[in-house]
Amino acid sequence: MKVLANDGLDQSGIDALTLQGFEVITKKVPQEFLIEYINEHKIRTILVRSATQVRKELIDSCPSIEIIGRGGVGMDNIDVDYAREKGIHVINTPSASSESVAELVFAHLFSGARFLQDSNRKMPLVGDTEFASLKKAYAAGIELKGKTIGIVGMGRIGQEVAKIALGLGMRVIAADNMIGKASIKVTFYNKQFINVDIETEPLQEVLKHSDFITLHVPAQKEGFMIGKKNLKL
Ligand SMILES: NC(=O)C1=CN([C@@H]2O[C@H](COP(=O)(O)OP(=O)(O)OC[C@H]3O[C@@H](n4cnc5c(N)ncnc54)[C@H](OP(=O)(O)O)[C@@H]3O)[C@@H](O)[C@H]2O)C=CC1
Ligand SMILES: O=C(O)C(=O)CO
């Protein structure tokens, strides 16, 4: 079976599929030539990340497609319901990146709380002449320990964020549409662990009581989740 991984695929994925007898093509086919390419090469599985669009027109024009795979969580670039109606198997990798996204949240939080982005840019440029004023500005940096993080969306990623926050000694509060109580298991390197239950609260309460807010919800119908008004709370 021919598999087109149009947005790239890690070598381990290529190896695993090849071992099972699949022919994996990692050539990037531009969107405008995709239908033609799929039909010409009788591609049966198309794997994408977020760049390639798999819309109704492509689905209708490429009868050889049996599987559409998304390496990642969000499937906004795929007409999922339509494809499934036509009997195509549509799959994604729901948990694969949760820890990675959660770590990135803390990369940004640490960086923001200590002005790292700004200082890494300005120190090499004007550090010699403006050291005193820069030092004063960056002295306003704060620690995360003891602060309150408000997690909006306590799903897979939100719960990974909670684990890191608890490990850092932060207070964790959360809002979620569906999840009322999340039981967070924080596991240490030596397999010891603690369980912490977090009851979710109404969004407005979370916004009011958080030092930092992190959003882990899918795209919303309204197009946005919180605005200026909420951030003032
Ligand atoms: N930027 C990046 O690099 C990445 C982004 N993502 C995106 O992050 C998002 C979250 O992923 P993941 O944690 O795996 O998803 P999950 O489905 O596990 O968790 C999302 C949670 O948010 C809840 N939710 C949805 N809307 C609201 C709302 N308005 N208020 C409160 N809670 C809400 C959901 O409830 P319910 O089920 O009831 O809707 C669900 O419990 C996805 O949209 C994904 O595409 C994922 C990976 C990487
Ligand atoms: O949804 C995901 O998995 C992403 O990587 C966002 O593009």
Image: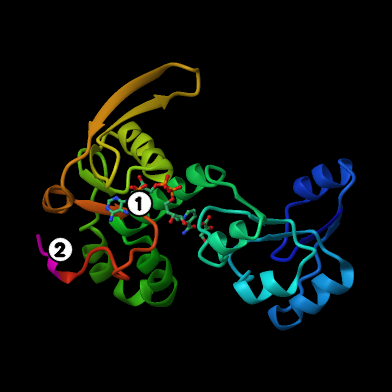
Residue 5, horizontal then vertical, whole percent: 75, 61
Q: Which residue is mark 2?
A: 230
Q: Position of residue 141 (x, y in %)?
A: 24, 55
Q: How is the image coloured?
A: rainbow
Viewed as shown, does residue 62 lie left or right of 25?
Answer: left
Viewer-proximal residue among 183 and 101: 183
Q: Is residue 120 magenta?
A: no
Q: Quadrant of residue 219?
A: bottom left
Question: Considering depth in this image, is 210 or 220 the residue closer to the camera?
Answer: 220
How would you classify the magenta stretch by its main secondary structure?
A: helix
N-terminal of the pair, mark 1 or mark 2, is: 1
Give the mark count: 2
Residue type pointed to by label 2: Asn
Tell whether position 230 is magenta.
Answer: yes
In-image side of 211 versus 87 (left or right): left
| Residue 84, disc | none
Q: Secondary structure at mark 1?
A: helix
Residue 128 is situated, as x and y percent measured from the top left of the image, at 37, 73
The magenta region covers 229-233
Quick check: 221 above or below 181? below
Residue that appears at 73% across and 75% down: 61
- Few, some or many C-alpha atoms within 10 Å of disc 2 (few <14, some 14-19, many ≥20)? few
Of the residues shown, which amino acid type is indicated by label 1?
Phe
Counting other residues with Cα less than 10 Å from the Cα at mark 1, is it few (<14), some (14-19), or many (20 or more)?
some
Point out residue 201 in the picture as x, y percentages from the top left corner.
17, 42
Q: Which residue is mark 1?
A: 110
- Determine whether the residue tagged by mark 2 lies in a helix, strand or loop: helix
Q: Could you tell me how far apart the alpha carbons at marks 1 and 2 are, in whole angstroms?
A: 23 Å
Which image quadrant for residue 158?
top left
**x 69%, y 78%: residue:** 31
Q: Is residue 70 above or below residue 126?
A: above
